[in-house]
Amino acid sequence: MELRQLRYFVGVSEAGSLLQAAARLHVAQPALGQQIAALEHELGAQLFARSSRGMALTDAGKLFLAHARIVLADAERAKLAVRESAAEPHGDVSIGLPTTVALAATLPILSACRARLPKVRLKLVEAYSGFLREWLLSGRLDLALLYGRAPDIGLAKRAMVDDQLVFVTSPANTGIPDKLTLQDLALWPLVLPGQEHGLRRMIDEACAPHRLQLDVIAEIESLGSVKRAAEAGLGSTILPLGSVAQEVEAGRLRTAVIDSPSMSRRVVCATNVARPQPVAVAAVMELVFDVLRDMAGTGCWPVRWVGDDAPT
């Protein structure tokens, strides 16, 4: 079976007759008919019902048409990929970022892309990690930074950083030690996201083995509103250190380390294993790795780099 035969088959199915298909494909009608007959012989099935009115697909032909179009599309993508491999990366690339990661990494990634990949146009999408995973699987995103080190069917993951969660409170709360236990957290009124949020689930799962019941006085989905509530002294919270770095430096919030290995989130770069990775997407992925490695190394984002030695 040859790609040429598949193209001829699709052409005849769309034209509805050998005469019209031959004209469209610039092939002699007898030669076209011979190729279709050879294809049917190889498949052991009649693909067309022939009549004086033309050629109509049989049930077997309809089934084969769907597969033939996929094969031809894949062949075209492969050809384009080879052509692009020798060219400068270009085109649109969509990246999903969780809100707490986007706060630290959006501008550095955008700046590096403008400098290193000027022909690539980024589309940066900020959302909850769960939404980003769904959009990545559905093809709406080319790659996404997600939380979680566990294997995920349909996704390829590369470890990047470990993001430490900290206790966050108003600077008016004096006398707080530099380190708190999980049991200490239960003594503080907290403002946290709702239970469907990934951060909240992680906190609840860390407390569950100790049978700790946290004093959650309010559930707020907005990161900005959670930080403002803590700053106003309405309740403390638990957030990644990087998401409050500016407020801590300005003296508007203060933090304490939570003495628990469960209070750390692995950030991974994920792609859809079912989708071929264009040159531009691969280039952007390596750029994101370089940017986050530099941010972790210089301390401008208070995370621990694990990308070189802890793949998931």
Image: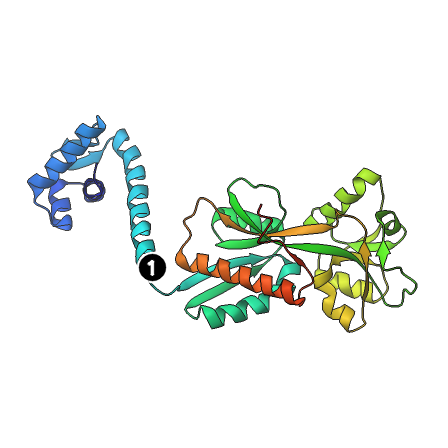
Where does the image place residue 30, in percent across and percent down from the top left? 7, 39
Q: Which residue is mark 1?
A: 84
Q: Is residue 202 left or right of residue 51?
A: right
Please tell me whether mark 1 sits on a helix, a strand or a loop. Answer: helix
Q: Is residue 177 left or right of residue 149?
A: right
Q: Quadrant of the N terminus?
A: top left
User: In terms of depth relative to the viewer, which is nearer, 178 or 12?
Assistant: 178
User: In terms of depth relative to the viewer, which is nearer, 153 or 47?
Assistant: 153
Where does the image place residue 125, in percent across and percent down from the top left? 55, 60
Q: Is residue 44 left or right of residue 97?
A: left
User: In terms of depth relative to the viewer, which is nearer, 253 or 137?
Assistant: 253
Q: Residue at x 8, y 42 (%)?
A: 29
Q: How is the image coloured?
A: rainbow
Q: Residue at x 87, y 54 (%)?
A: 189
Where does the image place residue 95, in percent across and percent down from the top left? 52, 58
Q: Can you name the residue that lies furthest to the top here?
A: 44
Q: Residue at x 90, y 51 (%)?
A: 187
Q: Amino acid at mark 1?
A: Glu
User: In terms of depth relative to the viewer, which is nearer, 150 or 228?
Assistant: 150
Residue 53 visible in the displayed image: no
